[in-house]
Amino acid sequence: MAKIKLGAIAGQISGSVGTWTFGHNRGGSYVRNRAIPITHTSEFAMNAKARLAQCSRAWADLTDDQRLSWNNWATTYPITDVLGDKRNLTGHQAYIKLSTRLLLAGNGTPTTPPSSDAPDGLTTVTLTADIGAGAFQVAYTVTPAPADCKVWVSGARIPHAGIAFVKNKMKYITCSANAAASPLNWESAFYARFGTPAVGEIIFCWACILDTATGLLSLPTMDSVAVTST
């Protein structure tokens, strides 16, 4: 992997061009050979494709006025890309983003765009990762979660504490029930996603509040803990 120094023409590059992939970390900007993607046929990948297909069909069933309202909403609420820049999605892109999230959480697809902002995040998140007789759970405040909201949890399994950047390793794990009280037992869902962790490995968790009416997520509240066994 080669390091590069960017100048006036390109201040920052992220993503792939041809056979090169650009990125940056604490050591600076770098470029590496692009990995050739493989076809994913796992249960998680197949379910994700099915959700995309379902949401595309739902978008096609919307009226012209409903699609126009999504276009207007997407223009008003830009997203922040990997370089920290604001950009606007199309109405279709915004609809798919929120709808697939709601389906993943066990809810239905919406017809109208959100009429409110994203919910406030959790105040605290505290992990326990005991693969023995103890608890493997996510405790949080405020508790219970607000009405018509779920706790949306992503996680990562890291081999040792020396790895600090984990954003690219985080994967969706599970959602709580509606307005659920703390703690959230995510042991079986985590094992299904990553396998059984070993003692000494590090578990990361990003927990958000999901508004089940809109599909909007709060900012994440984070915690990490070393795996133990009792």
Image (cartoon, rainbow, N blue to C red):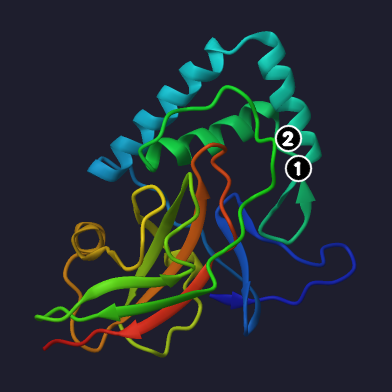
Q: Is mark 1 on a helix, strand or loop?
A: loop
Relative side of 43 to 123, left or right: left
User: Can you give x and y, in whole percent of width and height, for residue 17 in the image?
Assistant: 63, 51
Q: Quadrant of residue 95?
A: top right
Q: Residue at x 55, y 19 (%)?
A: 59
Res. 63 mark:
none
User: Can you give x and y, in whole percent of width and height, for residue 124 in the image?
Assistant: 49, 76
Q: Is residue 139 above or below residue 210?
A: below
Amino acid type assigned to the residue bearing label 2 in the image: Ala
Q: Residue at x 54, y 73 (%)?
A: 123
Q: Nearer the viewer, residue 188 or 147?
A: 147
Q: Nearer the viewer, residue 25 or 151?
A: 151
Res. 77 mark:
1
Q: What element carries label 2?
A: helix
Q: In which quarter of the image is residue 140?
A: bottom left
Query: Is the Cβ of the residue at disc 1 closer than 8 Å to that at disc 2?
Result: yes
User: Can you give x and y, in whole percent of width and height, for residue 184 in the image?
Assistant: 31, 64
Q: Crowdedness of circle 1 by 10 Å Cα count: few (<14), some, many (20+)?
A: some
Relative side of 81 to 108, left or right: right
User: Can you give x and y, in whole percent of width and height, for residue 12 in the image?
Assistant: 76, 66
Relative side of 64 to 1, left or right: right
Q: Crowdedness of circle 2 by 10 Å Cα count: few (<14), some, many (20+)?
A: many
Amino acid type assigned to the residue bearing label 1 in the image: Tyr
Q: In which quarter of the image is residue 23?
A: bottom right
Residue wearing tag 2: 74
Location of the C terminus by quadrant is bottom left
Tell how many labels. Answer: 2
